[in-house]
Amino acid sequence: MSFKKEPVTLKIILIGDSGVGKSSVMNRYVNHRFTNMYRATIGTDFLSKTVTIDKDTVTLQIWDTAGSERFQSLGPLLYREAHCCMLVFDVTSKASFSALDVWRKEFLFQAEPQDPADFPFIVVGNKTDLSDREVSRGKALQWCEEIGAEYFEGSAKEDLDVEKPFLRAALSGLRQV
Ligand code: GTP
Protein backbone atom coordinates (compact mmCIF):
# COMPACT_ATOMS: atom_id res chain seq x y z
CA MET A 1 0.00 0.00 0.00
CA SER A 2 1.32 3.47 -0.76
CA PHE A 3 0.55 6.63 1.14
CA LYS A 4 0.30 9.95 -0.59
CA LYS A 5 2.53 12.51 1.10
CA GLU A 6 0.97 15.74 2.32
CA PRO A 7 2.05 18.61 0.08
CA VAL A 8 4.60 20.80 1.79
CA THR A 9 4.49 24.60 1.76
CA LEU A 10 7.57 26.47 2.88
CA LYS A 11 7.50 30.09 3.92
CA ILE A 12 10.60 31.99 2.87
CA ILE A 13 11.06 35.59 3.96
CA LEU A 14 13.19 38.11 2.07
CA ILE A 15 14.54 40.98 4.13
CA GLY A 16 17.19 43.65 3.66
CA ASP A 17 17.54 47.39 3.03
CA SER A 18 15.36 49.29 0.62
CA GLY A 19 16.51 49.10 -3.01
CA VAL A 20 18.87 46.11 -2.70
CA GLY A 21 16.69 44.17 -5.12
CA LYS A 22 14.47 41.88 -3.02
CA SER A 23 11.43 42.29 -5.30
CA SER A 24 13.65 41.94 -8.36
CA VAL A 25 15.24 38.73 -7.16
CA MET A 26 11.82 37.27 -6.33
CA ASN A 27 10.31 38.35 -9.66
CA ARG A 28 13.24 37.04 -11.62
CA TYR A 29 13.01 33.68 -9.86
CA VAL A 30 9.23 33.26 -9.97
CA ASN A 31 8.16 35.15 -13.11
CA HIS A 32 11.44 35.28 -15.09
CA ARG A 33 11.04 39.03 -15.38
CA PHE A 34 13.11 42.08 -14.54
CA THR A 35 12.52 45.81 -14.73
CA ASN A 36 14.93 48.71 -14.22
CA MET A 37 12.09 50.73 -12.78
CA TYR A 38 12.09 51.03 -9.02
CA ARG A 39 8.77 50.67 -7.29
CA ALA A 40 9.14 50.46 -3.51
CA THR A 41 7.31 47.57 -1.92
CA ILE A 42 4.52 48.78 0.32
CA GLY A 43 3.88 46.43 3.20
CA THR A 44 4.45 42.92 1.93
CA ASP A 45 3.85 40.87 -1.11
CA PHE A 46 4.15 37.18 -1.73
CA LEU A 47 4.52 34.90 -4.70
CA SER A 48 4.35 31.12 -4.86
CA LYS A 49 6.40 28.74 -6.87
CA THR A 50 6.26 24.96 -6.94
CA VAL A 51 9.50 23.05 -7.18
CA THR A 52 10.46 19.38 -7.08
CA ILE A 53 13.03 18.36 -4.52
CA ASP A 54 14.10 14.74 -4.28
CA LYS A 55 10.88 13.73 -6.06
CA ASP A 56 8.78 15.67 -3.57
CA THR A 57 6.65 18.58 -4.68
CA VAL A 58 7.27 21.61 -2.53
CA THR A 59 5.48 24.94 -2.75
CA LEU A 60 7.63 27.93 -1.89
CA GLN A 61 5.68 30.83 -0.52
CA ILE A 62 8.12 33.69 -0.96
CA TRP A 63 7.43 36.82 1.07
CA ASP A 64 8.90 40.08 -0.13
CA THR A 65 9.02 42.74 2.57
CA ALA A 66 9.46 46.49 2.35
CA GLY A 67 13.02 47.53 3.18
CA SER A 68 11.82 50.92 4.31
CA GLU A 69 9.64 49.45 7.03
CA ARG A 70 12.35 47.80 9.00
CA PHE A 71 11.34 49.11 12.35
CA GLN A 72 7.66 49.45 11.71
CA SER A 73 7.44 45.84 12.54
CA LEU A 74 4.82 43.95 10.65
CA GLY A 75 6.99 41.66 12.59
CA PRO A 76 5.62 38.73 14.47
CA LEU A 77 2.72 38.14 12.09
CA LEU A 78 4.91 38.13 9.07
CA TYR A 79 8.03 36.43 10.34
CA ARG A 80 6.52 33.73 12.50
CA GLU A 81 6.42 30.26 11.09
CA ALA A 82 8.97 31.13 8.45
CA HIS A 83 11.04 28.13 7.39
CA CYS A 84 13.97 30.12 6.05
CA CYS A 85 15.07 33.74 5.90
CA MET A 86 16.95 35.27 2.98
CA LEU A 87 19.04 38.31 3.90
CA VAL A 88 19.56 40.35 0.75
CA PHE A 89 22.14 43.08 0.20
CA ASP A 90 23.52 45.01 -2.76
CA VAL A 91 27.20 44.23 -3.45
CA THR A 92 27.73 47.88 -4.47
CA SER A 93 26.54 49.11 -1.06
CA LYS A 94 28.63 48.47 2.02
CA ALA A 95 25.85 50.00 4.12
CA SER A 96 23.30 47.46 2.91
CA PHE A 97 25.72 44.67 3.85
CA SER A 98 26.45 46.08 7.31
CA ALA A 99 22.72 46.45 7.93
CA LEU A 100 22.18 42.70 7.61
CA ASP A 101 23.35 42.09 11.15
CA VAL A 102 20.50 44.21 12.49
CA TRP A 103 18.03 42.67 10.06
CA ARG A 104 19.02 39.22 11.21
CA LYS A 105 18.74 40.07 14.89
CA GLU A 106 15.40 41.75 14.34
CA PHE A 107 14.15 38.70 12.46
CA LEU A 108 15.17 36.34 15.27
CA PHE A 109 13.60 38.64 17.84
CA GLN A 110 10.29 38.83 16.00
CA ALA A 111 10.08 35.32 14.57
CA GLU A 112 11.00 33.56 17.82
CA PRO A 113 12.06 30.34 16.10
CA GLN A 114 12.18 27.25 18.31
CA ASP A 115 15.92 26.91 17.91
CA PRO A 116 17.42 30.31 16.97
CA ALA A 117 20.94 28.92 16.76
CA ASP A 118 19.84 26.45 14.11
CA PHE A 119 17.45 28.63 12.12
CA PRO A 120 18.47 28.69 8.43
CA PHE A 121 19.61 32.00 6.96
CA ILE A 122 20.68 32.42 3.36
CA VAL A 123 22.63 35.54 2.48
CA VAL A 124 22.27 36.89 -1.06
CA GLY A 125 24.58 39.51 -2.59
CA ASN A 126 22.67 41.04 -5.51
CA LYS A 127 23.72 43.34 -8.41
CA THR A 128 26.99 41.59 -9.29
CA ASP A 129 26.50 42.93 -12.83
CA LEU A 130 27.60 46.37 -11.60
CA SER A 131 31.28 47.33 -11.61
CA ASP A 132 31.37 49.62 -8.56
CA ARG A 133 31.43 46.79 -6.07
CA GLU A 134 31.99 47.65 -2.39
CA VAL A 135 31.61 44.25 -0.73
CA SER A 136 33.93 41.45 -1.81
CA ARG A 137 32.86 37.85 -1.99
CA GLY A 138 35.48 37.06 0.66
CA LYS A 139 34.08 39.58 3.10
CA ALA A 140 30.56 38.28 2.65
CA LEU A 141 31.70 34.68 3.04
CA GLN A 142 33.56 35.55 6.22
CA TRP A 143 30.46 37.02 7.85
CA CYS A 144 28.35 34.09 6.70
CA GLU A 145 30.79 31.72 8.31
CA GLU A 146 30.53 33.68 11.57
CA ILE A 147 26.75 33.43 11.65
CA GLY A 148 26.48 29.96 10.12
CA ALA A 149 24.67 31.08 6.98
CA GLU A 150 25.17 30.11 3.37
CA TYR A 151 26.22 32.69 0.83
CA PHE A 152 25.15 33.16 -2.77
CA GLU A 153 25.67 36.08 -5.09
CA GLY A 154 24.30 37.00 -8.47
CA SER A 155 22.26 39.45 -10.45
CA ALA A 156 18.51 39.67 -10.84
CA LYS A 157 19.11 41.95 -13.81
CA GLU A 158 21.37 39.57 -15.72
CA ASP A 159 19.61 36.47 -14.45
CA LEU A 160 22.82 35.26 -12.87
CA ASP A 161 22.58 32.58 -10.16
CA VAL A 162 19.15 33.65 -8.95
CA GLU A 163 17.77 30.14 -8.65
CA LYS A 164 20.47 28.63 -6.43
CA PRO A 165 19.67 30.49 -3.19
CA PHE A 166 15.97 29.61 -3.49
CA LEU A 167 16.68 25.93 -3.98
CA ARG A 168 19.03 26.04 -1.03
CA ALA A 169 16.38 27.85 1.00
CA ALA A 170 13.90 25.12 0.10
CA LEU A 171 16.30 22.40 1.20
CA SER A 172 17.08 24.18 4.47
CA GLY A 173 13.41 24.94 5.00
CA LEU A 174 12.49 21.29 4.63
CA ARG A 175 14.61 20.54 7.67
CA GLN A 176 12.37 22.86 9.68
CA VAL A 177 9.14 21.08 8.77
P1 GTP B 1 12.14 47.91 -1.42
O1 GTP B 1 10.83 47.49 -2.00
O2 GTP B 1 12.24 49.40 -1.24
O3 GTP B 1 12.50 47.18 -0.16
O4 GTP B 1 13.30 47.57 -2.54
P2 GTP B 1 13.78 46.15 -3.08
O5 GTP B 1 14.86 45.61 -2.22
O6 GTP B 1 12.62 45.25 -3.32
O7 GTP B 1 14.47 46.54 -4.47
P3 GTP B 1 13.88 46.41 -5.95
O8 GTP B 1 13.79 44.98 -6.36
O9 GTP B 1 12.66 47.22 -6.06
O10 GTP B 1 15.08 47.03 -6.79
C1 GTP B 1 15.56 48.35 -6.57
C2 GTP B 1 16.25 48.86 -7.83
O11 GTP B 1 17.42 48.08 -8.10
C3 GTP B 1 15.38 48.77 -9.10
O12 GTP B 1 15.61 49.93 -9.88
C4 GTP B 1 15.91 47.54 -9.83
O13 GTP B 1 15.74 47.60 -11.22
C5 GTP B 1 17.38 47.56 -9.42
N1 GTP B 1 17.98 46.21 -9.41
C6 GTP B 1 17.48 45.12 -8.81
N2 GTP B 1 18.29 44.05 -9.01
C7 GTP B 1 19.31 44.49 -9.77
C8 GTP B 1 20.48 43.86 -10.31
O14 GTP B 1 20.74 42.66 -10.15
N3 GTP B 1 21.34 44.67 -11.02
C9 GTP B 1 21.10 45.99 -11.24
N4 GTP B 1 21.99 46.67 -11.93
N5 GTP B 1 20.01 46.61 -10.74
C10 GTP B 1 19.13 45.87 -10.02
Image (cartoon, rainbow, N blue to C red):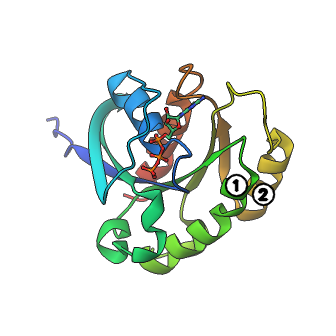
Q: Nearer the viewer, mark 1 or mark 2?
A: 1
**Amino acid identity at mark 2:** Trp
Circle 1 — which element? Answer: helix
Q: Is residue 47 left or right of residue 131?
A: left
User: Type of residue at label 1?
Assistant: Phe
| Disc number placed over residue 143 in the picture, else none | 2
Question: Is 5 above or below relative to 67?
Answer: above
Q: Alpha-carbon distance for marks 1 and 2? A: 10 Å
- Image coords of residue 110 (percent x, y): 43, 78
What residue is drawn where x is 53% and y is 28%? 156
> Is 101 or 55 nearer to us in this picture?
101
Instruction: Estimate the x, y position of residue 66 in percent, counting from the top left.
Output: 40, 57
Under tag 2, what secondary structure? helix
On screen, residue 47 versus residue 167, left or right, reads left
Compare residues 139 and 18 and report the one nearer the observer: 18
Give the vertical position of 21 relative to 72 (above or below). above
Asked if residue 60 shows in the view, the reply is yes
Crowding near pointer 1: few (<14 within 10 Å), some, many (20+)? Answer: many
Q: Which mark is residue 97?
A: 1
- Residue found at x 14% / y 35%: 1
Tell me which corner region of the image, top left, top right, bottom left or bottom right, holds residue 136: top right
Residue 104 locus on image (x, y percent): 58, 67
The answer to whether the residues at label 1 and label 2 have Cβ atoms under 8 Å apart is yes
Earlier in the chain: of badge 1 and badge 2, it is: 1
- Choose top left, top right, bottom left or bottom right for residue 69: bottom left
Residue nearest the observer in this picture, 130 or 6: 130
Quadrant of the rendered image containing residue 2 = top left
* Few, some or many residues within 10 Å of mark 2 (<14, 14–19, 20+): some
Q: Residue at x 28, y 47 (%)?
A: 46
Residue at x 32%, y 67% (from the top left corner): 78
Q: Is residue 54 visible?
A: no
108 sits left or right of 48 in the view: right
